[in-house]
Amino acid sequence: MDRAPGGLRVAYDANAPLNGEARALLAATPLDAFLASRCSSGQPSKVVVLDADDTVAFAMDTLARHAISSAPVLSSDSSTTAPFYGFVDVPTIVDAFYKGDYLSTPRYARSDRPGAHQPAPPPRYTQTSVSLGAYPTPLREDLVEPAPATGMLGRMEMLNSLGPKFAQMLLRHVSPGRDGELLFRAALRHSLLDTITSGFLRPPRAGVEACHRLAVFEFASVGASDASDPCAPAPVTVTHVISQTDVIRWTLKQADAGRLGVLPRATLGSIGAAPKHVVCVTTDETALDAYAAMLSAGLPAAGVLNAPVQHGGVLVGALLLDDLRTVSADTLGCLALPVGALKHNVVWSSAAHRPSTTDGPSPPSRRDVLMQRAALVALRPTDTLGEALHLLVAKKARAVFIVDDASHPLGILTPTDVLRLLAEESGRRVGDVSLAPT
């Protein structure tokens, strides 16, 4: 029971599905209507597509130039049975670089076709992660002596030497990201609910819980295909790329218009956002290792602590996979820097009492800088889903951290979590959660 404007008492059904109104709205919204509303709101409609024969360096430069997180990769090579390689983003590239996860033969190569073109396999490199194992010493504030060259500086030198070679590899030789799927244009007649449940939340690849982008495609005209080879795949054109973030923006508009029922008023603690596993790193951990932990956990963000958890560390910032967009193929060495230095462009001494190399007053502590310039977006368990939606959109955040009053991490809410709350038949009822008053 709630008090509406004017003092009237409004009753709600405690046995009703928590996301009942949201699911009904999603089911009644065709995907093409959703895309039309996105275009009318002024969001960019240009689709950036990469070719499988583009180099890693070209891909990274293209993503940075267009200020986008990822792009679909297609192949114009008629010797492939499928023209779609997947989505590529900088985290995928960095992960492949770190693991040495390169494909030895082109994906979908058609060896059964007479005269099929078989590009040469990529050069063999030692896995970067194995090579860096010889340089385990991180930069730490509490070192009495300067860090040896085989520590951070050694890792930087190695990364900078391996990076340019890796940057010349073709995208077809890099394991594609698991972050996107294809939708045929006919799917535009499907509902947004079907798109979320069958597209974002249930991609077909085994072991993948969700993907963040869907590429809508159509086949090129018949005249554009290779008439001399009826077995050649029909060329495809990507017409739209839909991201989870696009759906979050649309959801916020519906919530503000009161079309999602009581769901936006549900508290984060009561819908399962906390307690929940959170990947956390300290400011002294190397960025490369921090990103590897995030990718392994399948999370878009990691909390940055001012000290290890066992020493009472609290959240003072966030490290995002999107931060990698500022890294180019010839600057991979910066990933050997500590998290704080990479993210905030601040140089600290590697010894506690060494003089500063900057003029003027001593530089602020890492915690002070992180507090001032961090990308941390945090709420309490008693805050609501509606408040989280506003922060995700307004801050262009990839995650909302759930913290206690002392800023200890309790959980995390990602766009994937929001889509599950909106679309899945979880069986959670209105009476099962805590609702903030209107």
Image: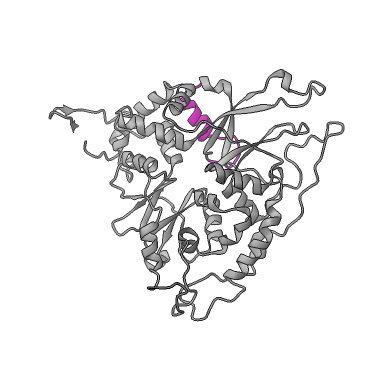
Residue 186 horizontal/vertical position (percent): 57, 20
Whether residue 143 is in magenta: the answer is no
Instruction: Using residue 74 as the reference point, say whether residue 252 is left or right of it.
Output: left
> What span is colored magenta in the figure?
190-209
- Is 211 located above or below residue 375 in the figure? above
- Is 309 located above or below residue 76 in the figure? below
Q: Where, quadrant-wise, is the C terminus in this rendering?
A: top left
Q: Residue at x 64, y 60 (%)?
A: 129
Residue 334: tell me if it is visible.
yes
Residue 375 horizontal/vertical position (percent): 41, 53
Residue 151 horizontal/vertical position (percent): 59, 72
Q: Indicate the quadrant where residue 5 lies.
A: top left
Q: Nearer the viewer, residue 101 or 45?
A: 45
Q: Residue at x 52, y 53 (%)?
A: 294
Q: Indicate the quadrant where residue 130 lies.
A: bottom right
Residue 136: tell me if it is visible.
no
Q: Indicate the quadrant where residue 13 lies.
A: top left
Whether residue 204 is in magenta: the answer is yes
Q: Nearer the viewer, residue 109 or 323?
A: 323
Residue 212 horizontal/vertical position (percent): 52, 39
